[in-house]
């Protein structure tokens, strides 16, 4: 099974598969800000939050940690094929929240190898994936990031249904005495907690918002068209003040969320005013805000009936979106930790 | 790592006097001196107009910093040196340069008189009229001046301004097919002007009240015919300034909440360790950021001279209502301290609500945003469409009509 939009051999699809892969490795060489715009447009045009998430999982969550922490060999091996769409990478959305969830994959050192055992659920893009980014914990709790190829003996992928975002293609990954060499380690061994994990978290918080900006715009467009077409009480809906005020608020939420997203994305290109690194606080507030915006926009649009059922799908998927990335519980705690300088 | 990219105190003296300014309902002279020394008003204007030509981010940052220090002082100073001065720079000519410089430097204070005693949201209710002076002679060479008559009400700086930029109807002579409306730059130190103050809930230090013009004189050069539509783009400076007031107020309320949460001990630990408090603080943090980012974008558009009516309307709707929510949370985090008269968050809570109303109330702006979404102009009709549907009548009970009246 493949994700058509990612593997289709057209120019545009190549860019969607590898916008963040550097040009010299065959990628689109786009900035983070440009990639966001691309993903926004993809969300608006595809009218499919699941497909948008699939694109983010591959082109951002699976790609950027490799670009940032991969050895030259790892980068040369994976990134050109990921950029062309030949290979897709997959990541579990349960592994983008640092250690806030207990680890479900264990790593044991055996001679010069690592032995991985365990199961991870909610792996976005798993059924089609060529390889997986997996975080595993040592017996003493230290965590390491691994690149695990699909054909590794002992690895199993089970496609799973998901109540939401079905077009993302979900799966459960089981590793049973999977033997990996040091060349499968991404970044410093036992240092995922300060390398790959914070990056994965911020990437999830920021970039999964991008397709949603496009979906919200599509819903707003549908809602405006609907208000122009339909009548209630013998009056066009466009004359109804409650409809008008609701639509105004939808538009406001779109603009606000886009502003949050653009700041956070741009920080991956240029850092913040006072440092070279993106701010985790900005990444988390972006997700916290956008999740609320998406909930309110999809709720306001829930009455729409388009042929492709976008309103129903988006309403369902919005609940899922708001619950991932740690959901409000993790995001509020993270933002509070930063603002209160505690935690 | 960066956390704080929002302004802190820029004018410590003004901030230290903010509580007093609220209690006494009076902006101290020292505030004006410090603002003039800091070149506050100059930031908003180009070099040619006598300003210092700050970029839009710097303008928003300076505005927010003052709004954080003292919202009342911010409102009064910014209405004059930004809003009124922009209108004079846009619609005035070379004869108005001394006036412009006086406002920018803070030597004189201006008010912007639009709203009257009837529904402020509806320009159709404004009655104030400018007509040719008669008998000739009063404001300059015979027959060339104008008089203005009418009452502007709920106007910032009305009680103490030197000058008012007034939106008025034009009484047109036969053959004059210019616009129905004009801006009149009216000297407020003259016998035809009476003013009054109106006590108000928040922004108490900000002078606020009415201007009654009874055949007050206006020189010919100070009456500029302007189509109402065009003027609304100028008014967006007002919406922007109010939005930034809201953002500054919200940021101050959040800062106070963070400080209080860090020091107030309950159940053996500071409140900051309570997840309920954290959730309120995190939400406020996210919402203020969202508003500020939109403010920067809107200001950049507006400063670049591009039309930004819809964007600034969106900003004003969100930022002002957001600040009401943030200050409400701040009061709650402070407990009884927060509802004690004279406490900072009690003052900010009162101040926040003023921004929702001032310079076009939220729902009036939502109508404007809706129109710009392509829904057509607002349609106002008498509310008469429910009864004909049969929905506005009590239904029978479970047993039907048979038992009624028994
Ligand atoms: C702090 C402050 C400073 C001010 N400074 C100035 C100033 O310097 N110059 C000046 O000219 N004015 C000033 N005003 C007045 C202000 O512009 C008006 O109060 C405002 O435009 C609303 O008018 P109104 O109070 O008459 O309310 P109304 O017009 O009576 O409206 C009352 C309510 O009805 C709603 N409403 C009105 N029309 C509609 C509609 N079409 N659709 C839906 N809802 C609607 C409004 O949103 C509002 O909530 C100031 C007001 C405040 C609070």
Image (cartoon, coloured by chain):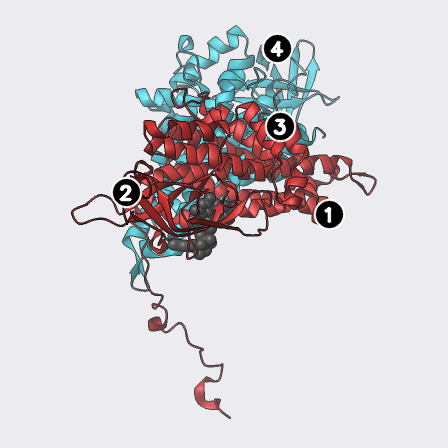
The secondary element bearing badge 2 is classed as: loop
Mark 1 and 2 residues: CB-CB less than 8 Å, in contact?
no
Q: Is residue A91 left or right of residue A87?
A: right
Tell me which chain the residue with mark 3 is part of.
B
Q: Quadrant of residue A211?
A: top left
Display colour for chain A: cyan
Q: Is residue A271 left or right of residue B166?
A: right
Viewer-nearest of discs 3 and 1: 3
The residue beneath circle 4 is: A182
Q: Position of residue B373 (x, y in %)?
A: 33, 43
Mark 1 and 4 residues: CB-CB less than 8 Å, in contact?
no
Tell me which chain the residue with mark 1 is part of.
B
Q: Rounded to the nearest whole Å, what is the CA distance between mark 3 and mark 4? A: 58 Å
The secondary element bearing badge 1 is classed as: helix
Q: Which mark is residue A12?
A: none
Q: Rounded to the nearest whole Å, what is the CA distance between mark 4 and mark 2? A: 74 Å
Q: Nearer the viewer, residue B67 or A240?
A: B67
Viewer-nearest of discs 1 and 2: 2
Q: Nearer the viewer, residue A322 or B330?
A: B330
Mark 3 and 1 residues: CB-CB less than 8 Å, in contact?
no
Seen as rendered, the residue at the extreme right is: B268
The residue beneath circle 3 is: B11
The residue beneath circle 1 is: B335
Quadrant where the N terminus of chain B sits is: top right
The secondary element bearing badge 3 is classed as: loop
The secondary element bearing badge 4 is classed as: helix
Disc 4 crowd, CA 10 A, few/some/many (<14, 14-19, 20+): few
Q: Rounded to the nearest whole Å, what is the CA distance between mark 3 and mark 1? A: 28 Å
Q: Rounded to the nearest whole Å, what is the CA distance between mark 1 and mark 4? A: 56 Å
Disc 2 crowd, CA 10 A, few/some/many (<14, 14-19, 20+): some
The residue beneath circle 2 is: B227
């Amino acid at each position: 099974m493949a994700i058509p939009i990612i593997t289709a051999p057209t120019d545009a699809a190549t860019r969607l598969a590898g916008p963040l892969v550097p040009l010299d490795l065959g990628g689109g060489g786009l900035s983070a800000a440009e990639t966001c715009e691309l993903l926004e447009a993809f969300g608006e045009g595809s009218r499919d939050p699941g497909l948008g998430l699939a694109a983010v999982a591959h082109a951002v969550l699976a790609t950027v940690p490799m670009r940032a922490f991969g050895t030259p060999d790892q980068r040369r091996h994976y990134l050109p094929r990921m950029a062309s769409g030949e290979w897709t990478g997959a990541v579990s959305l349960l592994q983008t929240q640092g250690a806030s969830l207990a680890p479900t994959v264990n790593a044991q050192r055996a001679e010069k190898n690592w032995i991985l055992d365990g199961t991870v659920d909610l792996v976005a893009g798993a059924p089609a994936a060529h390889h997986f980014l997996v975080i595993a914990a040592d017996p003493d709790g230290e965590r390491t990031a691994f690149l695990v190829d699909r054909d590794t003996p002992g690895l199993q992928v089970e496609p799973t249904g998901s109540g939401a975002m079905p077009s993302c293609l979900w799966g459960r990954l089981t590793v049973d005495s999977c033997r990996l060499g040091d060349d499968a380690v991404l970044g410093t061994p036992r240092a995922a907690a300060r390398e790959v994990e914070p990056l994965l978290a911020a990437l999830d918080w920021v970039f999964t918002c991008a397709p949603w900006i496009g979906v919200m715009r599509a819903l707003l467009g549908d809602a405006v068209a609907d208000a122009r077409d339909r009548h209630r009480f013998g009056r066009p809906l466009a004359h109804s003040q409650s409809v008008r005020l609701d639509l105004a608020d939808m538009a406001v939420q779109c603009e606000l969320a886009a502003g949050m997203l653009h700041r956070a994305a741009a920080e991956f290109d240029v850092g913040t005013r006072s440092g070279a690194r993106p701010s985790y606080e900005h990444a988390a507030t972006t997700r916290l805000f956008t999740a609320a915006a998406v909930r309110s926009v999809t709720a306001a649009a829930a009455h729409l009936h388009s042929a492709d059922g976008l309103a129903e799908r988006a309403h369902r998927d919005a609940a899922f979106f708001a619950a991932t990335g740690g959901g409000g519980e993790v995001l509020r705690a993270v933002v509070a930790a930063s603002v209160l300088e505690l935690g | 790592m960066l956390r704080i990219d929002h302004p802190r105190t820029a004018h410590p003296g003004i901030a230290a006097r903010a509580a007093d300014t609220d209690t006494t309902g009076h902006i101290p002279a020292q505030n004006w001196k410090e603002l003039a020394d800091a070149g506050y008003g100059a930031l908003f204007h180009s070099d040619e107009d006598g300003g210092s030509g700050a970029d839009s981010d710097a303008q928003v940052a300076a505005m927010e910093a003052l709004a954080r220090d003292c919202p009342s002082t911010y409102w009064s100073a910014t209405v004059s040196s930004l809003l009124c001065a922009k209108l004079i720079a846009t619609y005035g000519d070379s004869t108005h340069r001394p006036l412009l410089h006086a406002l920018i430097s803070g030597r004189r204070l201006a008010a912007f008189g639009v709203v009257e005693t009837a529904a402020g949201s509806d320009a159709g209710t404004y009655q104030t009229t400018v007509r040719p002076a008669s008998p000739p002679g009063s404001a300059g060479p015979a027959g060339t001046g104008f008089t203005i008559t009418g009452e502007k009400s709920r106007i910032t700086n009305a009680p103490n301004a030197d000058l008012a930029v007034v939106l008025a109807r034009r009484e047109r002579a036969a053959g004059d097919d210019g616009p129905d409306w004009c801006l009149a730059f009216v000297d407020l130190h003259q016998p035809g002007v009476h003013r009054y103050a109106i006590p108000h809930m928040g922004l108490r230090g900000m002078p606020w009240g009415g201007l009654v013009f009874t055949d007050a004189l206006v020189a010919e050069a100070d009456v500029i015919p302007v189509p109402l539509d065009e003027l609304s783009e100028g008014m967006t400076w007002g919406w922007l300034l109010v939005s930034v007031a809201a953002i500054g107020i919200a940021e101050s309320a959040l800062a106070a909440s963070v400080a209080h949460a860090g020091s107030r001990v309950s159940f053996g630990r500071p409140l900051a360790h309570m997840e309920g408090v954290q959730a309120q603080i995190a939400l406020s943090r996210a919402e203020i950021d969202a508003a500020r980012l939109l403010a920067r974008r809107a200001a950049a558009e507006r400063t670049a001279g591009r039309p930004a009516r819809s964007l600034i309307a969106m900003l004003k709707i969100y930022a002002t209502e957001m600040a009401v929510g943030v200050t409400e949370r701040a009061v709650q985090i402070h407990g009884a301290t927060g509802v004690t008269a004279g406490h900072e968050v009690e003052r900010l809570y009162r101040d926040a609500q003023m921004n929702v109303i001032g310079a076009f109330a939220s729902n009036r702006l939502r109508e404007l945003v809706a129109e710009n979404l392509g829904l057509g102009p607002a349609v106002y009709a008498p509310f008469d469409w429910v009864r004909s549907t049969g929905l506005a009548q009590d239904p029978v009970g479970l047993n039907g009509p048979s038992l009624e009246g028994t």
